[in-house]
Image: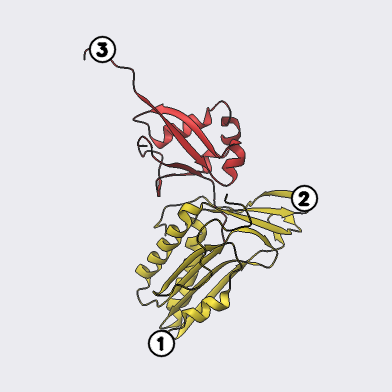
Chain colours: A red, B yellow
Amino acid sequence: MAAEAEPATMTVAVRCLGSAERAAGARSVEVTVSVTATVADVVSALESHPVSGAGLAPLLPQCAVAVGDEIVDRTARVAPAADVALLPPVAGG
Amino acid sequence: MTTSGSVPYAVDVNPPPTGDDWVGLSGDPLSVDAASAWAVVPSCGAVVAFSGHVRDHAPGRVGVSSLEYEAYEDQVTARLARVVEDIRSRWPDVGRVALLHRHGRLAVTETAVVVVVSAPHRDDAFEAARHGIDTLKATVPIWKRESWAGGESWGVDAQQLTGADAS
């Protein structure tokens, strides 16, 4: 109990939609973050992702992030095994 | 699986058998006429129909020949239903509401989106339909890729996606 434990981490698979899929070069990008991570932490991990980070970085500030069915802001917590999706600006209609 | 011309999920090009809400994402052509006819009910004296079509140009792009809509299909129908809820909370007298969006590859002039609202009086019908298309464009996760004389790329007039009750 006395020793500080290493913070536990989790792997989050982020689904990349629309132009984000092409920017990432993949439909889904996995990042490892702390179990107490917020959306901002996930976005930051995407930005520094070794394969997809460079492509995604310019797009990330404009992207909305959905956790489950809801679009959430960057301060929201990401639960383990949550469905996370990266949604670039939309152009329907 | 979102970009194929075939239709991998439920299509609602036909009106629902019951109820006053008709929302759907379709790989087949949309009919604003069918939606307008469906919206006519005894209590409503006004029907406003909006249809959005593929245009031959976009900002900085001339000679657009076709475009392809890609949808986050898991969420489109639910978000369209939320737009209907939002309309009904603002204009409680509204009768029927249809919100339909196409996906896949569309040629110039094809119908990409249909918004139809009926209401007892025209003010509500006009305002609710206008609010409906504006909210749809801001809250429903659909993206378009344009093919034009200079190449093919994502639409440049996109807007940042917002949560459900954006006003």
User: Is residue A79 something that shows in the picture?
Assistant: yes
Amino acid identity at mark 3: Ala
Residue situated furthest left in the rendering = A1
What is the distance, in whole Å, between disc 1 and disc 2 at their CAs? 51 Å
**Cα–Cα span, label 1 and label 3:** 74 Å
Compared with B84, B3 (above or below) is above
Callout 1 environment at 10 Å: few (<14), some (14 to 19), or many (20+)? few
Q: Which mark is residue A3?
A: 3
Question: Total of numbered circles in the picture?
Answer: 3
Q: Chain of mark 2?
A: B
Q: CB atoms at circles 3 and 2 under 8 Å apart?
A: no
Q: Secondary structure at mark 2?
A: loop
Q: Is residue B60 visible?
A: no
With A4 as the anchor, is B33 left or right in this view? Answer: right
Q: Secondary structure at mark 1?
A: loop
Of badges 3 and 2, the one in the foreground is 3
B39 is higher (above) or lower (below) than B51: below
Name the subunit of mark 3.
A
Coordinates of residue A47 in the picture (x, y in percent): 52, 31
Kindly identify the residue that appears in the image at 47 percent across and 43 percent down: A85
Residue identifier under label 1: B42
The percent position of residue A12, horizontal first and vertical second, equals 43, 33
The reply to the same-chain question for discs 3 and 2 is: no
Whether the residues at callouts 1 and 2 have beta carbons within 8 Å, the answer is no
Q: Amino acid at mark 1?
A: Pro
- Between label 1 and label 2, give the one nearer the viewer: 1
Frontmost residue, B76 versus B63 = B76
Quadrant housing residue B165:
bottom left
Residue lying farthest to the top in this orientation:
A3
> In the image, residue A62 lies at what x, y percent?
53, 43
> What residue does disc 2 label?
B150
A18 relative to B107 in the view: left or right: left
